[in-house]
């Protein structure tokens, strides 16, 4: 494990019942970097995120976060340890307003933690305008922003996101790209699953390509650009 690793996933195997989905996957996220998992539908990307979060715990292997072996911990304990998860379905409470959704997050970290209400308002002006609106009435993009805002309020040291751009119009994807660039500039460490190839390669420092439950390739966005066979075989771009 390199000295700067924030998260190190070491050869994990994850199952759904008898189905052996992840087969010896290793992933590393260095502090202050953005890492994306790419791959075709059903490759195991979401399962990798759920394994890290403890939602579908791996049966074998290790997951080391800031020096602690967290495999086998319950989800709430992993969240409290400093990992926030934005699921693909966004997980907002539809009948609650934006403000109420945000108020459900207990203040994370110490009193000078960077992500408070003011910082959220500044990063998400759209949400500020919609504070009194029920989440069910938000657009898909606004719901995604709410989900990210809620995750940030917990002041995580690692933000995990499952397909943040899925189903969103290009204009909204552009707005999210701006938000992610700012998060990256603030040195927020992120691990994301993304089907939007240009979005993922523009944002990330490092990429992993997952195919049929194994890591098929890893490297920089520039190197992937030249790896035509990998792109064609395992990503489909
Ligand atoms: P997608 O983009 O389609 O979500 P993915 O790469 O995230 O793809 P996963 O959702 O991790 O893939 O799924 C990996 C494999 O595990 C697939 O074959 C899928 O059918 C299977 N799978 C996912 N969730 C479950 C579950 N709850 N029970 C049984 N099998 C599952």
Image (cartoon, rainbow, N blue to C red):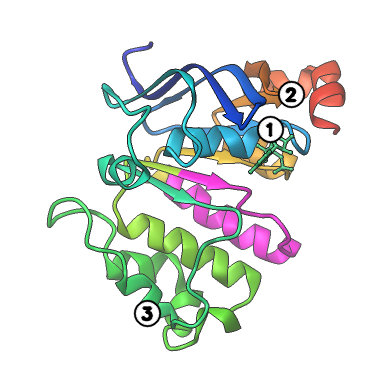
> Mark 1 and mark 3 in contact (Cβ < 8 Å)?
no
- Point out the tag, 3 or 1, that comes first from the N-terminus: 1
Which corner quadrant of the figure contains ligand 1?
Answer: top right
Give residue 234's quadrant in the image.
top right
Of 232 and 75, the residue lying toward us: 75
Give residue 200's quadrant in the image.
top right
Which residue in the rendered view is the most extreme toward the bottom? 132
Give the residue pinned by disc 3.
99
Q: CA distance from mark 3 to mark 2?
A: 40 Å
Give the residue pinned by disc 2.
211
Count of numbered circles in the view: 3
- Mark 2 CB in 8 Å range of ligand 1? no
> Mark 2 and mark 3 in contact (Cβ < 8 Å)?
no
- Start-end of magenta stretch: 160-184
Give the residue pinned by disc 1.
38
* Badge 3 element: helix
Q: Residue at x 24, y 63 (%)?
A: 106
- Point out the tag, 1 or 2, that comes first from the N-terminus: 1
Of 47 and 192, the residue lying toward us: 47
- Please identify, in this view, whether the residue under mark 3 or under mark 2 is nearer the observer: 2
| Crowd tier of the residue under label 1, counting other residues whose Cα lies within 10 Å: few below 14, some 14–19, many 20 or above | many
């Amino acid at each position: 494990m390199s000295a700067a690793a924030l998260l190190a996933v070491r050869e994990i195997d994850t199952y759904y019942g008898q189905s052996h989905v992840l087969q010896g996957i290793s992933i590393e996220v260095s502090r202050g970097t953005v890492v994306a998992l790419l791959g075709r539908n059903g490759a195991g990307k979401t399962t990798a995120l759920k394994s890290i979060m403890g939602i579908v715990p791996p049966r074998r292997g290790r997951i080391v976060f800031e020096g602690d072996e967290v495999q086998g911990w319950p989800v709430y304990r992993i969240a409290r340890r400093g990992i926030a998860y934005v699921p693909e379905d966004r997980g907002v409470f539809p009948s609650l307003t934006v403000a109420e959704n945000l108020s459900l997050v207990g203040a994370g970290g110490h009193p000078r933690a960077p992500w408070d209400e003011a910082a959220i308002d500044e990063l998400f002006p759209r949400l500020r305008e919609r504070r009194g609106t029920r989440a069910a009435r938000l657009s898909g993009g606004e719901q995604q922003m709410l989900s990210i805002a809620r995750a940030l309020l917990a002041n995580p040291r690692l933000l995990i996101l499952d397909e943040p751009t899925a189903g969103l119009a290009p204009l909204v994807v552009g707005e999210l790209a701006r938000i992610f660039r700012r998060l990256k500039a603030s040195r927020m460490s992120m691990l994301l699953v993304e089907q939007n190839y240009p979005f993922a390669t523009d944002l990330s420092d490092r990429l992993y390509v997952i195919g049929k439950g194994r890591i098929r390739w890893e490297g920089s966005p520039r190197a992937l650009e030249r790896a035509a066979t990998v792109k064609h075989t395992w990503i489909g771009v």
